[in-house]
Image (tube, coloured by chain):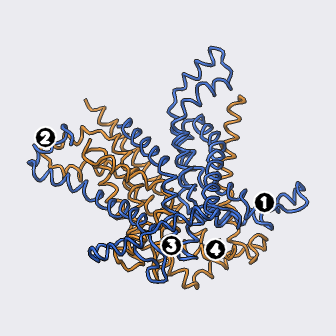
Chain colours: A orange, B blue
Amino acid sequence: MTRASRFNVVSVALGMAFLYLPIVLLVIYSFNASRLVTVWGGFSTEWYGALLHNEALLDAAWVTLRVALLSSTVATVLGTLAAVALVRFGRFKGRSLFSGMIYAPLVMPDVITGLSLLLLFVAAGFARGFWTIVLAHITFSMCFVAVVVQSRLVTFDRSLEEAAMDLGCPPARTFMVITLPIILPAVIAGWMLAFTLSLDDLVIASFTTGPGATTLPMKIYSQVRLGVTPEINAVCTILIALVTVGVLAASIVTKRREVERRRAERLAAAIP
Amino acid sequence: MTAVDAPRIGEALGPAPARRARWLVLAIPYAWLLVLFLVPFFIVLKLSFSTAAVAQPPYLPAFDFSDGIAGLLDRARQFTVDNYLWLTDDALYFRAYLSSLRIAVISTILVLLVGYPIAYGMARAPRRWQPTLVMLVILPFWTSFLIRVYAWIGILKKEGLLNQLLLAVGVLDDPLTILNTNAAVYIGIVYSYLPFMVLPLYATLERMDASLVEAAADLGCTPRRTFWRITFPLSLPGVVAGCFLVFIPVTGEFVIPDLLGGSDTLMIGKTLWAEFFSNRDWPLASAVAVILLLILVVPIVLFQNQEQRRAEREA
C-alpha cells in the first residue's frame, strides 16, 4: 500500500468515526440504567418505558408527525412544479427572481426565515399554531425538493417525452405517464428530505407556532436546556432509528429499481 | 418562453390550454414564494422602523394605509430609526455581529480542513465503495440537527465522556472545561456542517480527470506539488460551494451557540432570539435581522449565481 493511499484510508476512517461516534454514544447511553447520563449503571430499557407515559412528549410527537406529513407532501408538489418550470421553461420573465427565491432559502439562517414568516402571519391576522407551522415548513422545504428534482430533470433524456407527444399524447398526460415515473426516485428523495427537515426544525417552528402547538424538537430543546437526561437519549434514539431505517430502505429500493432498469435497457438494446 | 417547446406542445393540444397549463406550473410555486418568502422580508423591514409597545402584537405599526391620508401622516411622524440608532449605540450588538462573522470564518476554514481529506479519500477509494461512503456521509445529515448537537453535550461536559477517557488514559490530571466555551461551538459547527462541505468537494474531486494527475507525476512532479498545482485548483468549484453552504447559515446559527456555547459566546442568531423571545422587542429583533441580511446579501447572491451557473452547465 502506498503512502498516499494509506493517508486516504486513514482520513476517511477518522472522518466516519467523527461523524458516527457521538451518535453511537448517544444511542448506547439511552440504555443506561443510571440516571446520571455519563456514568454507566448497567443495561436497562426503563427510559423507553417511561416515554410511553409521558403524555406531553407523545402529544408533541403526534403534532410533529402531522406537520411533517402535510408539509412534505405539499412541498413535494410545489417543489416539483418549480423544478419543471426551472428546467423546461427556458428564459421567462422573472426567471432570475424565481431561481433566486428557490436558492436563497437553502442557505438563509433559520432565525431570519422564522421571524419574517411570523411577522407575515401576524400582519395577515392568521391564528398562529399548527397551520402556520405547516405553511412555514412548506415554504422552505419546497426549495430543497425543487433542487433535488431539478438535478434529475437536467440529466433526463427528453426524446422519450418527445416521442410520446409526437404520437399525440397531450403534455399533461405525457408528464404523468412518461416524465413522472422516470423522475420518481428524485421526487421521493425530495419528499423524504422535506419530511426530515420538517421533523428536525426547531427555530422556524418556535417562531411561527402559537398556543397549543408544540413540536417534538421544541419539547426536546426545552428539556435539553435543563440538562442531559436518559429520556431524551431514548427519544433521540427512536428518531435516529426511524430515519436510518427509512433512508436505508429507500436507498435499497432505488438501487434495485436502478439495476432492473439497466437490465431492461440492456435487453432492449439486444433486440435487433 | 422557449421557441423549441411552444410549437411542439401546441401541436399536441392546441396552443391555448397548453399555455394555460404552462402558466399554472410556473405561477403556483412562484406566487407561493412571493407571498411566503419575499413579502415577509418587506414586513421585517417595515417593522424595524416601528416602535415597540406593550400590546398584542407588541409594536406600533410604522405605516398603515387603512387610516387614510391623515392617519398616514400621523404614522409617518412615528416612523423611527431608533432601533438602528440603538443597535449602533450599544456596543453589544456590534460585537455580536463581529463575533458571528469571526466564528463563521474560522469554522468555515476548519470544516474545509477537516472535510477536504475525507472528500479526497472518498474520491480515491475503490469505485464500488464510493456509493456506500457517500451514503455514510449523507446519513447523519438526515438525522436531527438538534440531536447531533445534543449528543456533544454528553461528550464535552466536565464529567462527560471525553474527560473520562482522557483522565483514564492519564493524559490529563484535571478535567478540561470545553462545554460552554467557543471551542465547543467550533466542534459543534464542524460536526454539524461537515456533510455540506464533503459532498460538493467529493462531487468535483470524483469528476476530475485522473490522467492529469498521472501526467504531472510522469513529468516528474512531486505528489505535493501535483496536489497544489493540479488537484486543488481543479477542485475550487467544490471548495467555493462548500464554503458558501457552511459560512452563510453559520453566521446566523442559533442552536449550536445556544446549547454548546457559554454566556460569553456572542452570536447574532442568539441575540435575535433573545430580543424576540425574552425581551419581546419585535422591532429591535427585526432591525437585527435586517442588518444580518445586509451582511449576508453579498454571499447569498454569489451563491445563487454559482448554483444557477452549475444548473445551466449540467443542462
Q: Is any part of residue A186 visible from this angle?
A: no
Do callouts 3 and 2 point to residues on the same chain? no
Residue B232 quadrant: top right
The answer to whether the residues at label 4 and label 2 have Cβ atoms under 8 Å apart is no
Do callouts 4 and 1 point to residues on the same chain? no
Residue B141 quadrant: bottom right
Q: Which residue is mark 1?
A: B162
The amino acid pointed to by label 4 is Ile
For disc 3, the chain is A
Q: What distance separates the C-alpha of mark 4 from that of mark 3? A: 19 Å
For disc 4, the chain is A
- Secondary structure type for disc 1: helix
Q: Which residue is mark 2?
A: B7
Closer to the N terminus: mark 1 or mark 2? 2
Q: What distance separates the C-alpha of mark 1 from that of mark 3? A: 32 Å
- For discs 4 and 3, the disc positioned in front in the rendered view: 3
Q: Residue at x 43, y 56 (%)?
A: A105
In percent of width and height, residue A136 lies at 41, 67
Q: What distance separates the C-alpha of mark 4 from that of mark 2? A: 59 Å
For disc 1, the chain is B
The amino acid pointed to by label 1 is Leu
Image mark for residue A232: 4
Callout 2: 10 Å neighbours few (<14), some, many (20+)? few
In percent of width and height, residue B116 lies at 62, 40
Callout 4: 10 Å neighbours few (<14), some, many (20+)? many
In-image side of A64 versus B90 (left or right): left
User: Which quadrant is home to the N terminus of chain B?
Assistant: top left
Do callouts 1 and 2 point to residues on the same chain? yes
Closer to the N terminus: mark 4 or mark 3? 3
Q: Is residue B80 above or below residue B121?
A: below
In percent of width and height, residue B119 lies at 59, 40
